[in-house]
Image (cartoon, rainbow, N blue to C red):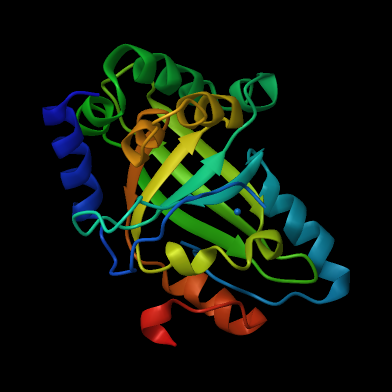
């Protein structure tokens, strides 16, 4: 990534800034909700299957922090997907997005490929959160994909994205390759991701309160 591309990446991240203090490192993986409803045990399994229909289970989630003090960059919430047919069978749009990422780079792809994003979720004994992606076209990735996360496994991470910000969709192999070499930087991590902006999520906030998950520092 050259100097101009780095500046563009930093500007893209600042546009999605939500005010957290930057941290020093990358945190490896440890997942808008249309509504949050509590279901009776008799109904929960049926509701769960309805919620999961058409979705793709993600491979994990993490948070990527800017190094040093940086120019006001915010953490990036990372959603990992499996680099195989578990993902690309039901969600071929993601295969196309990764092909375009390799061709264009993350910043150019972010600017040229609009993606509608929102959170959806379900409470219950094992709460679920779903990242809903809409690819309106006319680029080749037209369609939609839903990435499902077991929400309580990432209870410590939701605080970094509940108020909106930047999401990076990638595979663990891509991110490890980009960040494991000597001198790798935050922007090298960004280059390994399909970057998506997302707004604040009142329903994700509701789940955080319901399960008493950690709140953003500014809300503490």
- Quadrant where the C terminus lies? bottom left
Q: Is residue 96 above or below residue 75?
A: above
Report whether 219 appears left or right of 146. Answer: left
Q: Position of residue 68 (x, y in %)?
A: 32, 54
- Quadrant where the N terminus lies? top left
User: Which residue occupies the extreme front position in the image?
Assistant: 182
Q: Position of residue 155 (x, y in %)?
A: 63, 67
Q: Is residue 62 above or below residue 99?
A: below
Q: Is residue 50 visible?
A: yes
Look at 42% across and 41% down and name the residue there: 168
Marker count (numbered) = 0
Report whether 54 appears left or right of 8. Answer: right
User: Picture quarter containing residue 23?
Assistant: bottom left
User: Picture quarter containing residue 31?
Assistant: bottom right
Q: Position of residue 186 (x, y in %)?
A: 36, 41
Q: Is residue 61 above or below residue 69?
A: above
Look at 38% across and 15% down and name the residue there: 102
Q: Position of residue 52 (x, y in %)?
A: 69, 48
User: Picture quarter containing residue 9?
Assistant: top left
Q: Nearer the viewer, residue 216 or 138?
A: 216
Look at 63% across and 83% down and name the residue there: 212
User: Which residue occupies the extreme right position in the image?
Assistant: 42
Report whether 35 appears left or right of 218. Answer: right
User: Which residue occupies the extreme left position in the image?
Assistant: 4
Q: Nearer the viewer, residue 21 or 39?
A: 21
Report whether 120 appears left or right of 142. Answer: right
Q: Is residue 57 visible?
A: no
């Amino acid at each position: 990534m050259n100097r101009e591309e780095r500046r563009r990446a930093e500007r893209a991240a600042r546009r999605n800034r939500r005010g957290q203090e930057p941290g020093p490192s990358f945190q490896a993986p440890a997942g808008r909700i249309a509504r949050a409803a509590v279901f009776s045990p008799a109904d929960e399994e049926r509701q769960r299957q309805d919620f999961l229909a058409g979705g793709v289970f993600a491979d994990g989630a993490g948070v990527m922090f800017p190094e040093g003090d940086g120019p006001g960059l915010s953490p990036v919430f990372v959603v990992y997907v499996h680099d195989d047919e578990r993902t690309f069978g039901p969600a071929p749009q993601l295969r196309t997005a990764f092909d375009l990422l390799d061709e264009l780079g993350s910043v150019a792809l972010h600017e040229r490929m609009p993606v509608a994003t929102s959170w959806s979720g379900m409470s219950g004994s094992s709460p679920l959160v779903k990242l809903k992606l809409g690819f309106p076209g006319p680029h080749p990735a037209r369609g939609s994909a839903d990435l499902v996360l077991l929400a309580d496994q990432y209870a410590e991470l939701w605080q970094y994205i509940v108020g909106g910000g930047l999401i990076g969709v990638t595979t663990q192999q891509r991110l490890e390759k980009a960040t494991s070499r000597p001198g790798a930087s935050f922007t090298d991590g960004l280059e390994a991701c399909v970057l998506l902006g997302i707004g604040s999520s009142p329903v994700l906030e509701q789940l955080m309160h319901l399960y008493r998950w950690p709140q953003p520092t500014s809300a503490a």
